[in-house]
């Protein structure tokens, strides 16, 4: 699978060599154009704290839009054998809803994601957000649901990590290249 690390990205059709979950933690409150305001379908005024702001990273933003528009038909499987979900957290400083695309695995009924940030020394913004408020919204393909996020620790993390590294082998090199323990996050559907 090593040869798949730099391939044609179906989102941009340009070569990429980065984790789709890698995101600049400083981008939690970016000063960018409001994607909702650009959408002509967004004529209905929505309370500002309920508007969803997609990742400011260009290709991730386009991936999210196609995923949402097609109910995951285009985007759920980012690459062969690499499924993605959309995770929406509430910004810890702004209070705005923030959405990003993440590679995921399964553990029974739960979904599991990794806060790799491409091996950066800092946790990704979405992880910092869910530490502040673990109530999240998830979209997997065409299915959407609310969930509660928690960080796996100890034996649970040790059990889940190899499963996720099997889906995205770069996770192992990301962990080897940083001093922080990369978080494994379990998303449990709200009842």
Image (cartoon, grey):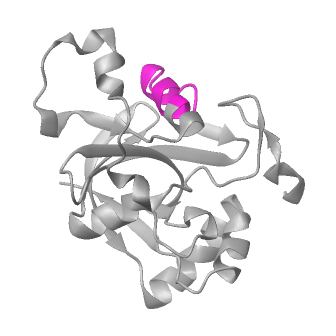
Q: Is residue 109 visible?
A: no
Q: Could you tell whether 22 is left or right of 140 in the image?
A: right
Quarter assignment of residue 131: bottom left
Position of residue 24 relative to residue 12, above or below, is: below
| Residue 175 sits in quarter | bottom right
User: Residue 128: horizontal and vertical position, in percent?
Assistant: 34, 67
Residue 46 placement, left or right of 61: left
Quadrant of the drawing holding the N terminus: bottom right
Q: Residue at x 66, y 48 (%)?
A: 82
Figure check: 34 above or below 100: above
Which residue is situated farthest in the right direction here? 3
Tell me which residue sits at (73%, 36%) in the image: 9
Magenta span: 62-75
In the rendered image, residue 63, in percent from the top left (x then y), is placed at 55, 32
- The residue sitting at the front extreme is 31
Quadrant where the C terminus is found in the figure: bottom left
* Residue at 64% across, 40% down: 78
Count the marks.
0
**72 magenta-colored:** yes
Q: Decide which of 24, 77 is in the foreground and name it.
A: 24
Res 185 visible? yes
Q: Position of residue 103 (x, y in %)?
A: 56, 52
In magenta segment, residue 166: no
Query: In the image, residue 147 lies at what x, y percent?
Result: 27, 54
Q: Residue at x 49, y 66 (%)?
A: 115
């Amino acid at each position: 699978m090593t040869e798949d690390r730099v391939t044609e990205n179906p989102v941009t059709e340009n070569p990429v060599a980065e984790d789709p979950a890698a995101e600049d933690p400083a981008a939690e409150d970016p000063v960018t154009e409001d994607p909702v305001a650009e959408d002509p379908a967004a004529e209905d005024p929505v309370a500002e704290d309920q508007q969803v702001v997609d990742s400011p990273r260009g290709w991730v933003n386009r991936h999210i839009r196609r995923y949402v528009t097609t109910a995951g038909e285009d985007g759920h499987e980012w690459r062969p054998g690499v499924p993605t979900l959309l995770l929406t957290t509430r910004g810890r400083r702004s209070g705005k809803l923030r959405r990003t695309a993440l590679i995921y695995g399964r553990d029974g009924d739960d979904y599991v994601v990794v806060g790799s940030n491409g091996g950066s020394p800092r946790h990704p913004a979405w992880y910092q957000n869910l530490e502040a408020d673990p109530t999240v919204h998830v979209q997997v393909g065409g299915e959407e649901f609310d969930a509660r996020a928690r960080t796996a620790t100890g034996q649970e993390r040790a059990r889940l990590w190899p499963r996720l590294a099997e889906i995205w082998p770069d996770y192992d090199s990301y962990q080897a290249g940083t001093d922080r323990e990369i978080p494994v996050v379990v998303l449990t559907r709200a009842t």
